[in-house]
Image (cartoon, helix red, strand yellow):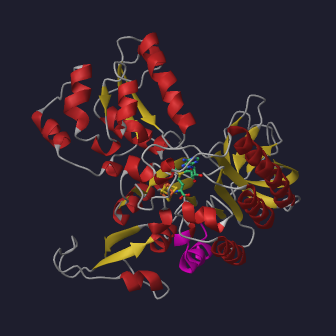
Amino acid sequence: MNKSDSERIAGHLEKRGYKKSAEREKAGLVILVTCGVRQSAEDRIYGLVPKIKKENPKVKIILTGCLVNREDVKRRLNGYVDAWMPINKIFNFQFSIFNQFTNFQFSNKKQKDKISCDKDDYLSIKPKYSSKFSAFVPIGNGCNNFCSYCVVPRARGREVYRPAEDILKEIKCLVKKDYKEIILIAQNVNSYKSEITNYPLRQSDSEASKLQITNKSNPPAGGQNSKLKFINFSGLLKLINDIPGDFWIRFFTSHPKDMSDELIKAIAASDKACRHIHLPVQAGDDEVLKKMNRNYTVSHYKSLIKKIRRGLPDVSITTDVIVGFPGETKAQFNNTVKLFKEVKFDMAYISRYSPRPGTAAEKLKDNVSKIEKKRREEELMKILRKTALENNKKYIGKIVDVLVEGRNKRGEWYGKTETAKNVKLGIKNPPNSAGKQELGIRTIIGEFVKVKINKVRGFGLEGEIVK
Ligand code: SAM
Ligand code: SF4
């Protein structure tokens, strides 16, 4: 999300004539998109901001992102930061800050008026994508769930979803430019809802038809004959899938409480949606889940995994988990161990609990020691390494599609499968159609290739390009 926000800030500035500085030391303005999800991310800012000012005393620093509303952070960085900018206010920020800092002049009044409009939908800003083949497309921002440990609803505000028409427009443009991977992002993609005019409802869109409304007080933009309807995430996925082209659709993150049968069916029916579901479990114990305010039980989570695996054969499943939540006993942690052994995740992002200011859990005693949190993390890692390797063994001898992402220092190509497995492509210069070793010159970055897998590791595959 922060990376995507940075792309939008860069797009916004570049459109107004700013240029990216080759070196940070020579920049006139540095904007930092901060993360406050864990203390470790926050601590990086306390080191980085003074460092930037020291190496370049004339630079103006703007902070945005998760830490922007925190008074204690503001006090701590007082004297270093020149302005604090909520990310969704970047339209309004144009005059007050950017200009004042950089003496930027609008070429004419029309341009000034256009930019100064009181717009709040920063997601509509055209980003400067950092990749030429893979793009983050935010479908929403904020969160309404208030998990007791999490700072996001306070830092990013309540859920706001982007109109489906806007999302489709951005994706169509990307596909035209030959983008191969569209990554839909929001804190909870599967609680997405949007009004849409003239949505071509099909019989299968059962959930969407249930949500269908005709908005009487606010007639749809398409005129009296067009009907305004709501679509949910399954509906959005279908519309994106209908865009002609050869591309993958990924999405992060799905919340277990909102993972519907309809969505699993929509993914199964899609030839573009990747067979990879990231479904954060956070804990494998019902009492801990309750204290976390996650609104599901372990048995619900396990039944979802079953349904996903039944509906999407060969799917890979990854998760997020927190160890050492306040009061988590060894027995409760052992339930998470049990869940890890049972589910056999392909990957897991394991976090040691970190108290966050303003959250409900901050009031609970952070009573699991640092050493014990580390030990719990390592125990889960050990299981993960085993289950991931076990899952990867199923790939041996298979031919899979790989989106080539780059070339490492040793000259080896690498990429990933639709199941989000990293793949090292063993051939340094794969032969072209004439059998010549010319690919060292022609780049295959951003292309799909067929790869025969011949070696697997815990967190990756190796193979040879066969086509
Ligand atoms: N919306 C997603 C969900 O519901 O699972 C997760 C978004 S959150 C920004 C990313 C991950 O950070 C979470 O899944 C959680 O594992 C971790 N996280 C959030 N707050 C944390 C905290 N206080 N301590 C440790 N990890 C935390
Ligand atoms: Fe944070 Fe929970 Fe919202 Fe995810 S669902 S962003 S963990 S509050």
Is 196 or 35 nearer to us in this picture? 35
Residue 205, image x, y percentages: 46, 83
Q: Taking the image as drawn, is residue 345 in sight?
A: no
Residue drawn at x 52%, y 68% is 241
Asked whether residue 372 is in view, the answer is: yes
Q: Position of residue 235 (x, y in %)?
A: 45, 74
Q: Is residue 259 magenta?
A: yes
Asked which quadrant contains residue 246, the reply is: bottom right
| Foreground residue among 225 and 94 | 94
Q: Is residue 272 above or below residue 59?
A: below
Residue 70, percent across and down? 37, 37
Identify the residue at image location x=73%, y=46%: 377
Q: Which residues are magenta?
A: 257-274
**103 vs 371: above or below:** above
Quadrant holding the C terminus? bottom right
Task: Report whether 275 appears left or right of 160.
Answer: right
Q: Is residue 257 rendered to the left or right of residue 21?
A: right
Does residue 208 sit above or below 94 in this rendering? below
Location of residue 425 (image quadrant): top right
Q: Residue furthest bottom?
A: 203
Q: Position of residue 217 (x, y in %)?
A: 16, 77
Chief SS of the magenta region: helix
Q: Looking at the image, is 445 positioned above or below residue 217?
A: above
Membership of 49 in magenta stretch: no
